[in-house]
Amino acid sequence: MWIRTQNKYILANVNSIRICKCDIDGDVYYSIHGHYDRYEQSLGYYSTKEKALKVLDEIQTSIMTEHQFRIDELNCTRNYFGKEYKEIYQMPQDEDVEV
């Protein structure tokens, strides 16, 4: 999945994502890290674990959404499943995430 980092400096094709609890200079924050091309990069920083989890939930939802389509033709009903892909996920800023 393509993700643009919170600071907009990196656009990466990320294949796994995790939340890390960080403590720098006495401040605790949560960073969402993505793994791509043998590298791990911070994608965004959030002030609470709940905000980081909300963003991870949004990423999960945007990866793939299935829709069911029903078509009735000549007394023959068929069900089709389609997948809708979101091209690029933009990491939201901390203040834009509501929990």
Image (spheres, rainbow, N blue to C red):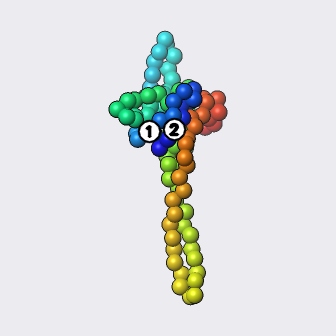
Residue 7, position in %: x, y?
57, 26
Q: Exactly how many numbered labels are in the figure?
A: 2
Residue 92 visible in the snapshot: yes
> What residue is disc 2 on?
3
The secondary element bearing badge 2 is classed as: strand
Q: Amino acid at mark 1?
A: Val
Q: Residue at x 53, y 85 (%)?
A: 76
| Quarter of the picture holding the C terminus | top right
* Residue 50, picture quadrant: top right
Report if the CB atoms under discs 1 and 2 are less than 8 Å apart.
yes
Q: Residue at x 50, y 48 (%)?
A: 63
**Res 68 → quadrant:** bottom right
Classify 20 as above or below 17.
above
Residue at position x 57%, y 87% in the image: 74
User: Residue 14 shows which numbered tag?
Assistant: 1
Q: Amino acid at mark 2?
A: Ile
- Residue at the extreme bottom: 75
Residue 46: x percent and y percent? 55, 28
Q: Which mark is residue 72?
A: none
Q: Is residue 97 left or right of residue 31?
A: right
Residue appearing at x 56%, y 70% in the figure? 69
Residue situated in front as seen by the camera: 24 or 81 = 81
